[in-house]
Amino acid sequence: MGWVDWQPFSYRNEQQQLRGLDVELLNAIFLRAGYQAKFNEMPWARVLHELKFGTVQLTMSANITAERQQYARFSHPYREEETAIIIRRQDAERWRGITTLEQLINTPDFHIGVLKGFDYGNTFRQLMARPELQPRLQMRLRLDQLLKMLQGGRIQGFILDPHGLQGWQDKDEAQAQLHTLLRIEVTPVHLMLSKESTTEAQLQRINQAIDQLKQSPDYQQILDRYQFRSLHSQENTHK
């Protein structure tokens, strides 16, 4: 299992124990499937590379894309995530007129930070392909790099699931001064398995375990521990 430090989804606590929403969900899925995960921390770009060659068998928190489908199998969705534009709270008044993606595209002085190798769902995937937006996209390997760029005014916002802000609140006062400008969409999240080193039968076994978990009280209890509510009921509010 390749994993990335990404609070509150996967991280090490003060005792260096592996914790997080995705880690707990994965362990609950594997318990039902009769598997045991061996976790290996690495950058996301390397996780994808290792999946292609089969040296990593699977990873968590993945969106389905055509490129990834060439080398990976995807499980049933095991949770949802939200895509949003995050800005500095001090800039909220400046950008309050941006209430749609089209307005964002038509604001030439708004530059956006994105993480290399990450997929942010179908809506933003189409947005990133727009020629007029290409020069305004700033791609980096790590979230802390995007945060520094935002604080320094080199970008005006970056893409993130707002739940990802939970782990920052106590780390640095400046990090708490973030604001969700625009909520884009809700997308299902999957486990991603290497085609090179897993089988279709293993995928089906994992899918059965996911279905069993979601029908059990354990599922909501895990979500509640991370204050993670289901976003599906809000889906009609995202454009």
Image (cartoon, helix red, strand yellow):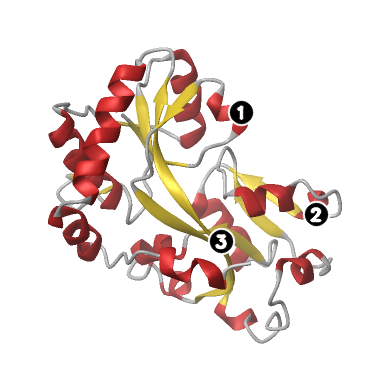
The image quarter containing residue 90 is bottom right
Q: Is residue 213 above or below residue 204?
A: below
Mark 2 or mark 3, earlier in chain = 2
Is residue 137 visible in this depiction of the protein?
yes
> Tag 3: Cα neighbours inside 10 Å, few (<14), some, or many (≥20)?
many
Quadrant where the N terminus is found in the figure? top left
Kindly identify which residue carries mark 3.
185
Q: Nearer the viewer, mark 1 or mark 2?
A: 1
Kindly identify which residue carries mark 2.
133
Q: Is residue 219 left or right of residue 202?
A: left
Residue 178: horizontal and vertical position, in percent? 51, 73
Kindly identify which residue carries mark 1.
67
- Residue at image x 42%, y 63%? 232
Q: Which mark is residue 110?
A: none
Q: CA distance from mark 1 to mark 2?
A: 21 Å
Judging depth in this view, the residue of 25 and 134 nearest the camera is 25
Quadrant where the C terminus is found in the figure? bottom right
Residue 161: horizontal and vertical position, in percent? 47, 60
